[in-house]
Image (cartoon, grey):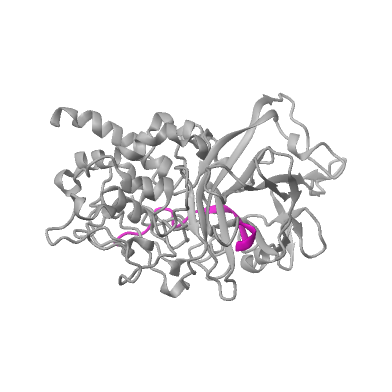
């Protein structure tokens, strides 16, 4: 074992380099942040009066600094962003929501004494009241595809007010001088929408939000430079390294009946992806600003893309590509579909993370016996009697039993469904603290998925076969020390909080003076 330590430590550094759910987790996607899917949430809506709805939240473009001007963080107009739903457990999408974006430059100009007015270098001019005067407008369309994602059964999602198919994405939070009340400004872009073949309208929001994922990035990157045992270090002893960051959110609230195949099959699986065109040509003489009569917004700039859509990012359950898939297969995982996940099965049944933690912490992180069928349940099939559908084809995605009622925010347990299991590994829904509406039964913003998954990987669900049990037979809980719970989020759609602004205003616009790590 000692001779293997240098090699194992090198592997730790490689495989743990992005335990931020899915922030910069693979070599290719780290170079393409606008299409980097960071987090995916799916849960029965717990906003008051919204029972019977499922909320889907796909976040993109990680680790946004609030002062990221003048361009800020527009989504890529040459990309395709998608949320996929499998409602018959065959590992193939049955419904796909497709998002496409358009960026239009409005050529705001000011008199300078030149022959004609010249375009300003900023994204905006002074606002009119609380409405920013924008030099770049972002709009988007959403389509619902039934059947294969590249099939012909495509219909537009429409605005329930007026019936239009084009929606506006609010500009990022520039600062209080540009947008005095950002929350009020952004809220006007929460749309009520008509979803094809769905009798009840849903809701939709696309825009910047405050990063909600909590993790101690610095310590994790530095060979897990913290004490991961809750019995030694309090679970919530550190602030999150992402607390001063923003992210871009695609949020949908859809009637449950529009997602499930039938009331007899209430369990759905879902994941989010992004795709780029297969070919790219760089134009050495980029086109000028796009106007209403100008060139296509999707060919603006130095890049022209074409060819088939090629998937470059994928995210279902959190942390899978970070702490399960080997670094040389991370780009391959991002390009793959759930139906082909058999090629990654060994990473799940024989995970490397417990071995690496054992190298770093010795007996404090014993290696559970393999094959790890408990992890197969958590990541590939769903947990029996909770969110495992009949006849499921093993495949990685987030699964939700829509028949399990939502837990109100004030009563949510941030370790999700973990406390539903007894120390012997049995599922007992009447256990004290049991919250079956939480991860891994879907995922809510307040679920502390880092602690849950670290504990599961180290044997939390193995019962008496768990080598990391305490001498008293209780669970051994592993933690990164960063707090994650429902109190950090709104209790209304889209749940993630107003993003931090670029101009100093309280905590807005300043770098964390005491960053974790």
Residue drawn 73% across the image and 68% down it: 129
In the depicted view, which residue is nearer to us: 428 or 125? 428
Residue 174 visible: no
The segment highlighted magenta reads: 237-259
Q: Nearer the viewer, residue 294 or 27?
A: 27
- Residue 384, x across and y down, in percent: 39, 55
Looking at the figure, which quarter contains the N terminus?
top left
Residue 3 location, quadrant: top left
Image side of residue 302 versus residue 318, left or right: right
Q: Does residue 277 sit above or below 125 in this rendering?
A: above
Looking at the image, residue 372 sits to the left or right of residue 121; the answer is left
| Residue 176 point in image, percent of width and height | 61, 64
Choose between 514 and 12: the one closer to the eye.
Answer: 12
Q: Inspect the magenta stretch and tell me whether residue 245 lies in it.
A: yes
Please report the residue visible at 33 percent of the width from the left and 61 percent of the height from the top.
418
Residue 4 at x, y percent in the picture:
19, 29
Q: Is residue 182 left or right of residue 370?
A: right
Q: Quadrant of residue 153?
A: top right
Residue 228, relative to residue 485: is it above or below?
A: above
Q: Is residue 322 magenta?
A: no
Evaluate whether residue 420 shows in this view: yes
């Amino acid at each position: 074992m000692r001779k293997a330590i240098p090699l194992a430590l090198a592997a730790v550094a490689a495989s743990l380099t992005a335990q931020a759910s899915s922030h910069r987790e693979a070599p290719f996607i780290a170079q393409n942040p606008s299409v980097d899917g960071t987090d995916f949430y799916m849960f029965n809506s717990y906003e008051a009066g919204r029972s019977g709805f499922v909320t889907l939240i796909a976040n993109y473009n990680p680790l946004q600094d609030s002062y990221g001007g003048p361009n800020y963080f527009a989504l890529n107009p040459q990309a395709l962003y998608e949320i996929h739903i499998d409602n018959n457990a065959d590992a193939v999408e049955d419904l796909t929501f497709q998002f496409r974006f358009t960026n239009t430059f409005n050529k705001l100009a000011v008199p300078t004494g030149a022959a004609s007015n010249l375009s300003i270098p900023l994204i905006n001019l002074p606002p009119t009241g609380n409405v920013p005067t924008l030099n770049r407008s972002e709009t988007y369309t959403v389509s619902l595809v039934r059947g294969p994602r590249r099939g012909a059964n495509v219909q537009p999602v429409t605005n329930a007010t007026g019936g239009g198919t084009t929606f506006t994405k609010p500009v990022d939070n520039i600062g209080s001088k540009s947008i005095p009340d950002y929350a009020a400004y952004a809220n006007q872009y929460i749309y009520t929408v008509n979803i094809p073949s769905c009798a009840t309208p849903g809701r939709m929001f696309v825009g910047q939000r405050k990063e909600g994922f909590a993790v101690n990035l610095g310590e994790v990157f530095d060979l897990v430079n913290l004490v991961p045992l809750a019995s030694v270090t309090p679970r919530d002893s550190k602030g999150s390294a992402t607390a001063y960051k923003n992210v871009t959110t695609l949020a949908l609230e859809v009637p449950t009946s529009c997602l499930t195949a039938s009331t007899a099959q209430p369990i759905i699986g879902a994941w989010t992806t992004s795709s780029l065109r297969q070919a790219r040509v760089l134009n050495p003489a980029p086109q000028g600003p796009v106007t209403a009569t100008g060139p296509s917004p999707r060919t603006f700039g130095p890049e022209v893309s074409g060819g088939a859509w090629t998937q470059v990012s994928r995210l279902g359950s959190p942390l899978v590509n970070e702490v399960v898939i080997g670094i040389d297969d991370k780009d391959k995982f991002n390009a793959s579909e759930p139906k082909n996940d058999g090629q990654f099965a060994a990473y799940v049944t024989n995970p490397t993370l417990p071995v690496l933690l054992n190298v770093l912490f010795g007996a404090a992180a014993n290696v559970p016996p393999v094959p790890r069928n408990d992890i197969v349940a958590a990541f590939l099939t769903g947990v029996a009697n909770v969110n495992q559908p009949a006849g499921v084809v093993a495949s990685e995605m987030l699964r939700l039993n829509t028949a399990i009622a939502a837990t109100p925010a004030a009563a949510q347990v941030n370790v999700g469904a973990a406390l539903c299991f007894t120390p012997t590994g049995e599922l007992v829904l009447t256990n004290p603290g049991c919250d079956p509406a939480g991860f891994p039964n879907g995922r809510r913003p307040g679920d502390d998925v880092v602690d849950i998954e670290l504990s599961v990987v180290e044997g939390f669900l193995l019962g008496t076969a768990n080598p990391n049990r305490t001498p008293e037979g209780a669970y051994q809980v592993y933690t990164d020390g960063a707090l994650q719970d429902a109190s950090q989020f709104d209790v209304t759609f889209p749940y993630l909080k107003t993003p931090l602004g670029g101009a100093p205003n309280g905590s807005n616009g300043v770098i964390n003076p005491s960053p974790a790590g």
